[in-house]
Image (spheres, helix red, strand yellow):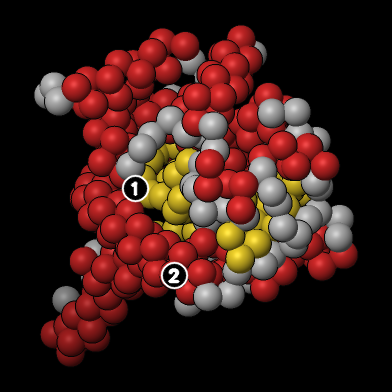
Amino acid sequence: MNLNRLPILQAFLAVLCLCASVATHAADAYVLKFATLAPQGSTWMKAFDAWGKELATRSQGRLTVKFYPGGISGDEPDMLRKIRFNQLQGAALSGHGIGEIFPPARILETPFLFRDHAEIDAVRAKIQPVIDSGFRNNQYELLAWMEVGNIHFFSTKPLGDMKELARRRIWQWQGDRFIEAFLNANGWSPVALPITEVYTGLSTGLVDTVVSTPLASIALQWAGKTPYMSSQPMATGIGAVVVSNRFYAGLPADLQALLKNTGASLSQKLIADTRRDDLKSLGVLAKSTQPMAGFHMIDLAEQTALSRKAVSTLEAKGYLLAELDRRVETALTQHRSGKN
């Protein structure tokens, strides 16, 4: 070999190694396109932004998140459809979206089932493995469980009692079979709309009553249209942070572990922050809304019976699972009796 050409050859090999290194790094970089209805600046988006930064830092840039907040990717069914076509890989979902993946988990949203957050936490801990498996078996990996807050009635008009709701135009999330069953059990006739059209519906009078949380009502700007609010919450809304099995399975083992580990801490933060800020929002709304007089004395026995009727209907249709629902009842009874 001509020794004069050796430096040139060494330089050429160095360039090849550098190109190979760059190509390997590029092939090992993953972008999680993630959608949510949560508006920018909301409690949820602050937590998601921090989570995205943590993933990028701890993975040294190998795993980054591109967020699509505020419903710019459409309603939750739209998000799930885009995940199926790999246009998105993950999303934060409320109960409606969860119902599109693993409907039985929505037993945790049953109106007037739980008395406080301690009961919710105790019961969910008992059935969490079933929920995790339910998501996984339906092509999703559950990274974090969350809540959207305590659900109240909000209305453009005063309401004397719950029977008056039969004469109101109550919003029902379009395609939400769970809430539809409970509204029907009460004899109420809902108006089905995507969540992205509720603000316009309140403005035009298409709907005059919504079920929502204080935090969501403020974040979605519905509060300005609904000056009347029930003081008694009917349930606690559930939520989930998910990625598609296809995306998750395509990650190296260390990035899978990173997603799961950060998801666990994200879940704790989301639940704690939501409960705190939902309570703060309730205080804010107390200054600008009037209570619905008749809702101070809700007949809980009657409402519990109606909830059970709706649950039975959904079990018969295969939306809920009777076996899981009985496990929830047993866990709740044990908790209330002080058993471990």
Closer to us: 122 or 102: 122
At 32% across and 71% down in the image, what residue appears? 50
At 72% across and 37% down in the image, what residue appears? 163
Residue 58 visible somewhere in the drawing: yes
Residue 253 position, x and y percent, is 24, 45
Residue 19 position, x and y percent, is 33, 72
Q: Which residue is mark 2?
A: 283
Q: Is residue 296 above or below residue 203?
A: above
Is 32 positioned to the left or the right of 155 in the image? left
Residue 270 visible somewhere in the drawing: no
Q: Is residue 337 above or below residue 62?
A: above
* Secondary structure at numbered mark 2: helix
Q: Quadrant of residue 271?
A: bottom left
Residue 332 position, x and y percent, is 30, 24
At 54% across and 20% down in the image, what residue appears? 305
Q: Quadrant of residue 333?
A: top left
Q: Quadrant of residue 158?
A: bottom right
Closer to us: 138 or 125: 125
Mark 2 nearby-residue class (10 Å; few <14, some 14–19, many ≥20): few
Q: Which residue is mark 1?
A: 144
Taking the view exactly as shown, the residue that stands out farthest to the bottom is 4
